[in-house]
Image (cartoon, grey):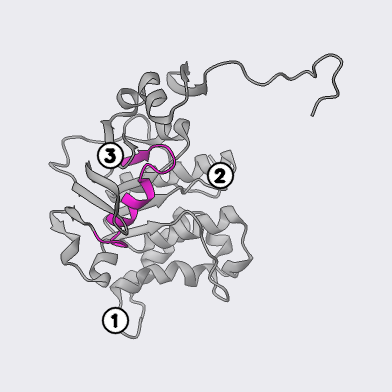
Amino acid sequence: MDQHYRGQASNGDGLDHNEVSGPSLAVLGVSAGYGDVDVVVGVDLGVRAGEVAVLLGPNGAGKSTLLRAVAGLMPVRRGSVRIDGADISGLDRRALARLVALVPQVVHPAVGFTVREVVAMGRSPHQGAWLAASPADHRAVAHALDACGLGDLADRRADQLSGGEAKRVAIARALAQGARVLLLDEAGAHLDIRHAEAMYALVQAEARARRLACLAVMHDLNAAARWADQVVLLQAGKRIAAGPPEEVMTAPRLAEVFGAEMRVADVGGRPAFLPAGPGPSRSRPSGGRGL
């Protein structure tokens, strides 16, 4: 694992399924959309404390729209989103921010602020009008910086970081927020494989340790199979299947949903997803100049 990340990947499932009686995050028949169009239609799902659930589906399936509805960034037209039994529609922005933290796909650097200051911004929902930091705030920021391996970068300007470093800062800010639900919208986007794997290991470890309900949008089938406790498969705004990756991510179902034939191979006891059919030729055709 990358030395910058302090979280440790779980050995096996890592969940005690007897610890939690019901979902910390419950999405109940949710429909949401833009204009007169419902992009998400009647979706149900539940994520328990300590669990990582992944939303999978083709482009336009409604994954990011559903995540925005869960975050309270757009209205739910029908159904409800509940956190620990409370309907989020009855919460103001400050109260909701104490329950839900979102890491967006694109992280915009905070110009002129240090990494420590950006992470500390996650504590604002817990602070008064003057945003005076308490000892609890300082502890939360220090823990988040350490968990994300940002101690050496804490005093560097956030707008001078690489893309991978900026993503780690965004995750640290979300962890410092101390929310019950962690939402990730393509958190692995724009990261190389080493940093993406380390980031997912960190998220899984923090979800376990903090008893967070984590809901993540992914496009990488292999990463979803490796890190998800459950997969929720969406197509055309509707839930097609939900459950453990090995049950949901079958070759016939993925081919139907994504419109592409898929091979599922066993690699070291884990499934690996490969496009079906021959790959491109590595040699130039005889008599041709190639492309």
Question: Which residue is denoted by mark 2 in the rendering?
Answer: 195
Nearest to viewer (mark 2 / mark 3): 3
CA separation in Å, label 2 and label 3: 32 Å
Q: Which amino acid does label 1 sit on?
A: Gly
> Where in the figure is residue 256, as x and y percent of width and height?
38, 25
Residue at disc 2, secondary structure:
helix
CA separation in Å, label 1 and label 3: 41 Å
> Where in the figure is residue 247, as x and y percent of width and height?
30, 23
Question: Which residue is denoted by mark 1 in the rendering?
Answer: 128
Residue 107 counted in the magenta span: no
Residue at disc 1, secondary structure:
loop
**What residue range appears in magenta?**
51-75
Q: In which quarter of the image is the C terminus?
A: top right
Q: Earlier in the sequence, mark 1 or mark 2?
A: 1
Q: Which amino acid does label 3 sit on?
A: Lys
Residue at left 42%, top 59%?
A: 144
Q: In which quarter of the image is residue 161?
A: bottom right
In the displayed structure, would residue 180 be above or below residue 18?
A: below
Q: Which amino acid does label 2 sit on?
A: His
Residue at left 43%, top 22%?
A: 270
Question: Which residue is denoted by mark 3 in the rendering?
Answer: 238
> Where in the figure is residue 140, as x and y percent of width and height?
37, 64
Report how many numbered discs are placed on residues in the image: 3
Q: Are marks 1 and 2 in contact (CB under 8 Å)?
A: no
Residue 57 counted in the magenta span: yes
Residue at disc 3, secondary structure:
strand
Farthest residue to the bottom: give it: 130
Q: Earlier in the sequence, mark 2 or mark 3?
A: 2
